[in-house]
Image (cartoon, coloured by chain):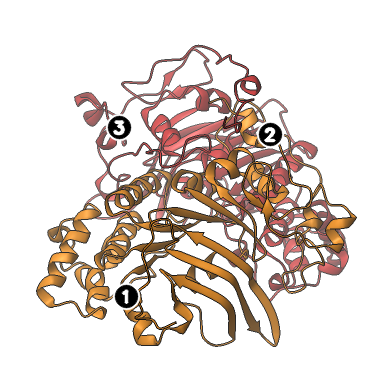
Amino acid sequence: MRPDMPSPAVADQPLISIENLSVQFTRAGKQMRAVQDVSLHVAPGETLGLVGESGSGKTTIGRALLRLLPEANTQWQGSIRYQGTDLAGLSKTDMRRMRGRLQMIFQDPVSSFNPRRKIEDIVAEGLEIQGIERSERKLRMEAALRDVGFSLADVAGRRPHQFSGGQCQRIAIARALAVQPELIVCDEPVASLDVSVQAHIINLLQDIREARRLTMIFISHDLAVVKNVSDKVAVLYMGKVVEVGTGEQVYSRPAHPYTRTLLEAVPVVDASRKIKPAAERMVMPSRNRPPEGCAFRLRCPRAADRCAKEEPVLGVGPGGQSVACHFPHDEPAPNLVSESA
Amino acid sequence: MSSAPNSAILECRDMSCLISARPEPLRVLEHIDFSVARRTSLGIVGESGAGKSMLIKSIMGIAPKSVQVSGAISIDGQDLSGMKPKERAAFIGRKVGIVFQNPMTSLNPYVPVGRQVAEAARRHLGLSREAARNRAIELLSVVGIADAAECYGYYPHHFSGGMKQRIMIAAGLVCDPELLIADEATTALDVTVQKEVLDLLQTIQEERRMSLILVSHNLGVVAGRTDEVLVLYGGRVVEYGPTAEVFRNPRHRYTEALLSAMPQMDQPAHSRLRTIPGQPPSLAAKPDGCPFAPRCAVAADICRRVMPPMAVASDSRHRFACHLPLEAQAPMRSPDPIVAQGGVGHAS
């Protein structure tokens, strides 16, 4: 498909659809499959949360969406369509233009800035790349800063090191907003921040999302944060989607044993009972040589013979979500049972 | 070895840390008072810059030279201030084990992990090479490393983050300490691995009848895993008491604000989080009164002028430093949570 071909804008058509995305990295002659056969769809205005442990492929999917994967030693297959346009087919110039609609916010704002540039130039950089005129650039840069609670006078002439982590993250949000994108990929945007600052940034992202009707992909290892911001949640394990559904489905009736393991591990602020430490240890399978059958079976309390022979595929789970498990759970979440509302 | 069985393993009395600077010294920690009883666990929580790490470093005697530590610290009933630096280091080394936040940087990449575990046993217990090796292997299996004898010779890069943190715990345990300090030991780990490492720390603490200090910025890590909790803010203890009591019935405005700023999994999507306005105080411009006053919703004139003294709650072990504390709550929330939540998920 030609990149400049307009696609019909149907209301319930996904803004972005990922079909059968696989990504392999080659390191020292060994192949590592970071993402395997992932399909995800995000509707306009919707927020999709991606959760999973480190190495589950969350960031790789986020980067693939913006074609930010390293070119050397990386192969990928599958299609990523943005309003019907296949991003793989875009030339570098067209992709650069496309990034006016797709933006990303990174985990560590300080290292995602050029330390020697002034804040106003950092925020306006995307506009410059998009070829926006100087006068328009200034207006949009000021508006973006205002949206995150800064005035131009607060930041003018200053550099990243003069701001705290939370302030830098607000500047990073302003930089992403300045080009007026339709979709923002947030990769662990609050992981490096203190609790009190984290709450600010989450509220800010929510306000902006609402005001601008933004579509978001929110990557985080913090399940409570993802629950708060997401309409839809996808749980990743070793590069595969093991469960995907609305936040309500995934959190209150998790069907995949891995989702339940994750939810049980979240430290909850509930000091009324003392936690009983678990005696047995989990086995971590190698990522280079994933086990036959279901990748989670070595850690799974429900694993049976079938799990070793036959790899489960995504199907409709008991709560209406999609789940890739032969023996999905059909009961409320472990945490919710013990918590008073 | 332990002298008086009833005395606290660690006691800090009126401890302050100053960094000399102009025009006036930076007050990193002020008037810290707490103790850790034998076989109990203490959680220390606070945001970055609250002074958590400096507190631990001062106790361990590894604070930078530019920091002046005052006040009395005693370990196992012995006052540390009278000791010469070498004597002190040897004493602390035998009594206290520590696990730092980042296992990637606290292990030497060029030295086999087993030798790094054995190092303290050679140094502090004077064990022979062979005996230290056996002890290290024993501890590596205690912390859950399979084939410990084989792994003794492996290098840090052979292990994952969670495994490295287990090795650090083994190193912390090698002198059979009476107190183990975990300074943000699980912060860099995945939730599932974090849970495992916390479970391990808790099990070891009970089995070895040690005391444990868990330092974390994450209130969830400390809740349900410690007996007492100390909340630090701006270099001051703002609240201190039995963990269940402090979390259920916080009296200091900061503790309460921090608790409600955390996103909870039982909130619906897109619910607004409560925020704390402003920034934690900078060391250079610390207010005279309560350090939280500039961000506090109810701060009055007195809060900005006078540092509130420690007040005692009805449970006499629960203390807080606030002029305008939150009301004490009724003893226990009663509705049975299992019954209350039974219907969740049945949409229709």
Q: Residues within 10 Å of mark 1 (few under 14, many from 20)?
A: few
Q: Are marks 2 and 3 on the same chain?
A: no
Q: Residues within 10 Å of mark 2 (few under 14, many from 20)?
A: some
Between label 2 and label 3, give the one nearer the viewer.
2
Q: Position of residue B248 (x, y in %)?
A: 52, 24
In the depicted structure, whether residue B187 falls above or below residue B253: below
Please state, as top left, top right, bottom left or bottom right, where the C terminus of chain B lies in the image: top right
Which residue is tagged 2? Answer: A275
Residue at position x 32%, y 25% in the image:
B308
Q: Nearer the viewer, residue A44 or B50?
A: A44
Element class at badge 1: loop
Q: Earlier in the sequence, mark 1 or mark 2?
A: 1
Whether residue B13 is visible: no
Q: In the rendered image, what is the letter of the chain coloured red? A: B
- Chain containing mark 1: A
Q: Quadrant of residue A151?
A: bottom left
